[in-house]
Image: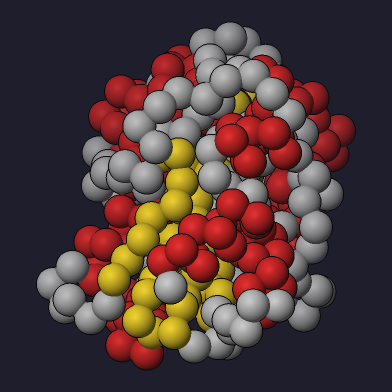
Amino acid sequence: MATREACGKALAELIVENEKIVVLDADLTKSTKTIEAKKACPKRHFNMGIAEGNMMGVAAGLAASGKIVYASSFAMFASGRAYEQIRNSICYSNLNVKICATHAGISVGEDGASHQCNEDIGLMRVIPNMKVFQPCDAIETKAIIKAISEIEGPCYVRLGRSKVEDVFDESYRFEYGKGRIIRKGKKVCIIASGMMVQEAMKVGELLGKEGIEPTIVNIATIKPIDEKLLIEMAKTHEYIVTCEEHSIINGLGSAVCEVLAPYRLCKVIRIGIEDVFGESGSTAELFDKYGLSADKIAESIIRLL
């Protein structure tokens, strides 16, 4: 299941369970899957049209009136077009607006560079009061969407268009601000977020054939990031490799480096989108071209070692 689909299902449950929940969408109800919330409770779902800035302003007003507002659009529009309203109307006042941004990263594929938002994590995590999340599968997505209804202040959840394999089972419990070790190894620690967690797990299998057993860590909360876990990984590994479907500028890799730079404990290598725009193509083709496929990541780690 795609994480955007899981988000829609979670919102449909939340809007029935909590009468404070209001869902807004910017004319992409079917694509973002907030249509599920509309079906469950049409009186508290509002299509704001192609007016993302206005949607965020309305979200701020509703939140200031005591509502918990989930506002959704594509990542390109949610983080880009509405940036000023998010900063000044939502974050400055520390309001309960939860931005669920779908179709993030180059996995949007054939839609091309205009819709492939590789900058949104950086835009959002730099704003004071904003919390940033990126779940890796449907189960983690549902848990995060529900958890942020109880986290005070603005939140940004980065979601994908493509279907992804499950990493976790129903026993999974989300811990705010905590990373999770998926596989324990030695020497190399791969830190990933979103659908790159699945790629990292494939990398682990490929490296295992070469006699390399990497540790794999899932970071679902990018801000505030799990500093304690990162420092522990840096102390117990020679190399940390960050993998993200985002620009290496001000994304997950940058966040990890910001934590570890003062300690100089190990070498950190960032794998992600270089300082370039994407292009049209299938997800598999683009992941391979930009070095995000399991094969390409494994090659990079083998060269590093």
Q: Where's residue 94, x and y in %?
A: 31, 46
Residue 222 to residue 91: above or below: below
Position of 120 with respect to 103 (left or right) is left
Q: How is the image coloured?
A: secondary structure
What residue do we see at 49% from left, 58% from top?
300
Q: 284 or 108: which is nearer to us?
A: 284
What residue do we see at 27% from left, 44% from top?
126
Report the number of numbered marks. 0
Q: Where's residue 296, x and y in %?
A: 59, 52
Residue 176 appearing in the image: no
Residue 295 appearing in the image: yes
Q: Where's residue 179, x and y in %?
A: 49, 73
What residue do we see at 30% from left, 23% from top?
84
Residue 243 to residue 267: above or below: above
Position of 17 with respect to 69 (left or right) is right
Q: Quadrant of residue 119?
A: top left
> On the rendered image, what quadrant is the C terminus found in?
bottom left
